[in-house]
Amino acid sequence: MNWSDLKLNSDGHLPVVVQDDRTGQVLMVGYMNEESWQKTLETREMWYYSRSRQELWHKGETSGHIQKVKSLWMDCDSDTLLARVDQTGGSACHTGEVSCFFTPVTLPGH
């Protein structure tokens, strides 16, 4: 699959859902630009585009918590990527949590 085959969001990025390959836990959501897409394919480690810093970002570059790619899956519309990874270091979230998804939302009536 080539970058030109993908349907990007309005900012020209590809959303990426990142899942622990062993446990199935959703770890985080990131975004890719063409450069991070290519680096991920070349290195088999996750690279993202940081929208807040507006720069390329290698996951684990400063923390050592690298995400090694086990498999990549494109959704049916070619507009979202699922990355199954081996998360080293135990923490995918910048807060130190294993997953970025640790805050429950209370549904009305519950």
Image (cartoon, helix red, strand yellow):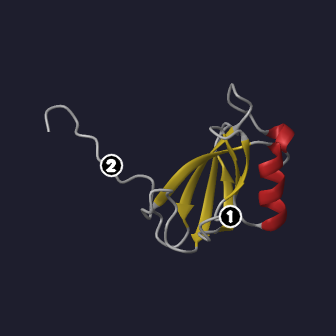
Element under label 2? loop
Asked if disc 1 and disc 2 are in contact, CB closer than 8 Å, the reply is no
Rounded to the nearest whole Å, what is the CA distance between mark 1 and mark 2?
Answer: 25 Å
| Spot occupied by residue 44 in the image (x, y as percentages of width and height) | 76, 67
- Could you tell whether 95 is left or right of 1 in the image? left
Local crowd size for mark 2, using a 10 Å CA cut-off: few (<14), some (14–19), many (≥20): few
Q: Residue furthest left?
A: 109
The label shown at residue 103 is 2
The label shown at residue 61 is 1
Nearer the observer: mark 1 or 2; the answer is: 1
| Spot occupied by residue 53 in the image (x, y as percentages of width and height) | 67, 41
Q: Residue 86 sits in which quadrant?
A: bottom right
Using the image, determine if residue 41 lies above or below residue 107.
below
Which amino acid does the dot numbered 1 rest on? Glu
Say which of 86 and 89 sits in front: 89
Give the number of marks: 2
